[in-house]
Image (cartoon, coloured by chain):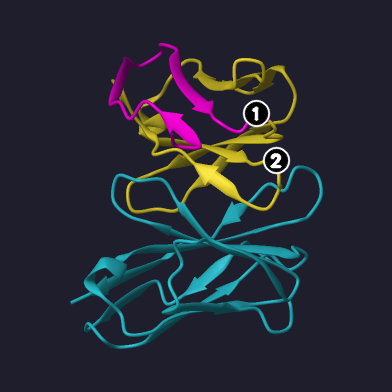
Amino acid sequence: QKEVEQNSGPLSVPEGAIASLNCTYSDRGSQSFFWYRQYSGKSPELIMSIYSNGDKEDGRFTAQLNKASQYVSLLIRDSQPSDSATYLCAVNTNTGNQFYFGTGTSLTVIP
Amino acid sequence: DTGVSQDPRHKITKRGQNVTFRCDPISEHNRLYWYRQTLGQGPEFLTYFQNEAQLEKSRLLSDRFSAERPKGSFSTLEIQRTEQGDSAMYLCASSLAMGGDTQYFGPGTRLTVL
């Protein structure tokens, strides 16, 4: 079992819609969770971090964490074509010294 | 300081040659990470430094790979006797060891081994 799993997609949504990206992780003791956006040929860019159960909102982005279910998600409201990218979920393990990334979900926002 | 920098951005080498990459982290960050990313995959952890100490090393990191951070500032990653399977994007990230350890990535070095 991989430490972090994501649906690779591709996920397509129309412009203005809500895009929902999901991630599960295996280490129940994980403490820190991150969403990164990666455009083709570029390095990952941090979108949000979340550490406690519940929702965290930042502009059009909302991260949701459920530690009991070992599940973290990212909602993108009012999706724009510029949001088209691969979204990577990252988890800091219980030891705190290693980050595990999922394989990423490819999102396309259709104008 | 505008962020993490890496040099070179691209490297093409022949199989069997040695290559060295450099990473300069955000100046106040005491943690530095190296990752490798291949097409369609997420970044794969290679190694991690806190200040000058190498605290963690992936079991995937063969003995052809070595990393240093001699003064706790910049870091180098060397690959000896490169193989075609080493072709990948090599990413460096840095973080401050508090506040959740959020990592910020450099632009990466793309290695092609012919």
Looking at the picture, does residue B53 appear above or below residue A69? below
Picture mark count: 2
**What residue lies at 49% left-to-right and 34% top-to-bottom?**
A4
The colour applied to the residues of chain A in this rendering is: yellow
**What residue lies at 38% left-to-right and 84% top-to-bottom?**
B80
Amino acid type of the residue tagged 2 in the rendering = Asn
What SS does tag 1 mark?
Answer: loop
Which chain has been coloured cyan in this picture?
Answer: B
Which one is in front, A87 or B51? Answer: B51
Q: Is residue A16 magenta?
A: yes
Task: Find residue A89 and report its horizontal and vertical position in percent.
Answer: 51, 35
**CA neighbours of label 1 inside 10 A, class few (<14), some (14 to 19), many (20+):** few
Task: Find residue B87 and report its horizontal and vertical position in percent.
Answer: 28, 67
Amino acid type of the residue tagged 1 in the rendering = Arg
Q: Which residue matches tag 2?
A: A94
Magenta-tinted stretch: A1-28
**CA neighbours of label 2 inside 10 A, class few (<14), some (14 to 19), many (20+):** some
Looking at marks 2 and 1 on the same chain, the residue that comes earlier in the sequence is marked by 1
What SS does tag 2 mark?
Answer: loop
Host chain of mark 1:
A
Q: Which residue matches tag 1?
A: A28
Looking at the picture, does residue B68 appear above or below residue A73? below
Residue furthest right as drawn: B98
**What residue lies at 70% left-to-right and 40% top-to-bottom?**
A94
In the displayed structure, does residue A26 sit left or right of residue B83?
right
Q: CA distance from mark 2 to mark 1?
A: 8 Å
Task: Find residue A7 and report its horizontal and vertical position in percent.
Answer: 36, 25
Which one is in front, A104 or A60? Answer: A104
Which one is in front, A77 or B59? Answer: B59
Task: Find residue B68 and report its horizontal and vertical position in percent.
Answer: 61, 80
Which one is in front, A26 or B22? Answer: A26
